[in-house]
Image: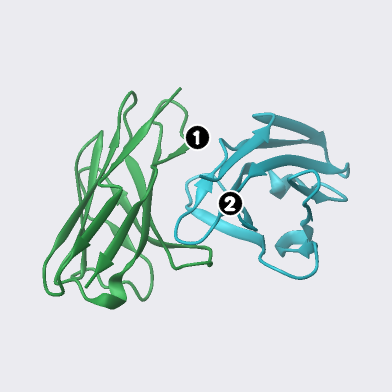
Amino acid sequence: GAVVSQHPSWVICKSGTSVKIECRSLDFQATTMFWYRQFPKQSLMLMATSNEGSKATYEQGVEKDKFLINHASLTLSTLTVTSAHPEDSSFYICSARDNRAAEKLFFGSGTQLSVL
Amino acid sequence: AQSVTQLGSHVSVSEGALVLLRCNYSSSVPPYLFWYVQYPNQGLQLLLKYTTGATLVKGINGFEAEFKKSETSFHLTKPSAHMSDAAEYFCAVSEDNDMRFGAGTRLTVKP
């Protein structure tokens, strides 16, 4: 079945540094990918919709300069948390829509970010 | 680690009929359980969630789900399907700092 690889699964960084998270569709092409954030014991929050070859669409309240999204190919989207601070510590998860069956969505395994 | 199984990748019902989408989970601790819906060309939307307390949880659009610990289930139901309910539905489990999703169930509603 279709697989979405998200890397890294865990990252610990110092405050002020930047962290890049990759979301890769392994056996299908995805023009559209989604980035979500989850705080402990809460539901997912959609951060942005990533579209290959164009600018991402950010949800209200999400800082686009803080969370940089690049969707440079049909199989890869990256989320960079710039100048990370402890309040950015969270679980980030991506999902990718299969171009062959646009209704079908596949999830990465998530990235736990801890900012010290 | 927690995991989720959604039984049936496709469910088809007639408009006005009962909707039942099945979800079973495994978790080493009392879980937090969620149902999400994805409409075409949109991101996920939270339907409902169970954290603690009452085991029957009511969500948006007339959906509800019941947490049954003995059966490790969290099935989603709606008494009467509407055409607008056609979508992909995802069950998810969270133990603390992460979330695991089922493979999704496509709901089709026939006129």
Q: Residue at x 28, y 52 (%)?
A: A10
Q: Residue at x 65, y 58 (%)?
A: B30
The residue drawn where x is 45% and y is 55% is: B98
Instruction: Say which amino acid is labelled 1.
Output: Lys
> Which residue is located at x 53 percent, y 66 percent?
A41
**Rendering coords of residue B8 (x, y %):** 69, 29
Per the image, the residue denoted by label 1 is A104
Mark 1: secondary structure: loop
Q: Which chain is cyan?
A: B
Determine the CA span between mark 2 and mark 1: 20 Å
Kindly give the residue lying farthest to the front in the view shown.
B28
Report which colour depicts chain A: green
**How many marks are shown on the rendered structure?**
2
Amino acid at pointer 2:
Val
Residue A63 numbered tag: none
**Along the line of sight, the residue nearer the viewer: A49 or A110:** A110
Co-location on one chain, circles 2 and 1: no
Residue that badge 2 annotates? B93
Location of residue A61 in the rendering, given as x and y in whole percent from the top left corner: 36, 76
Mark 1, Cα crowd under 10 Å, few <14 / some 14-19 / many 20+, is some
Few, some or many residues within 10 Å of mark 2 (<14, 14–19, 20+): many
**Chain under disc 2:** B
Task: Tell me the quarter of the picture where residue A77 sits.
Answer: top left
Residue A18, position in %: x, y?
A: 13, 64
In the image, residue B14 above or below residue A90: above
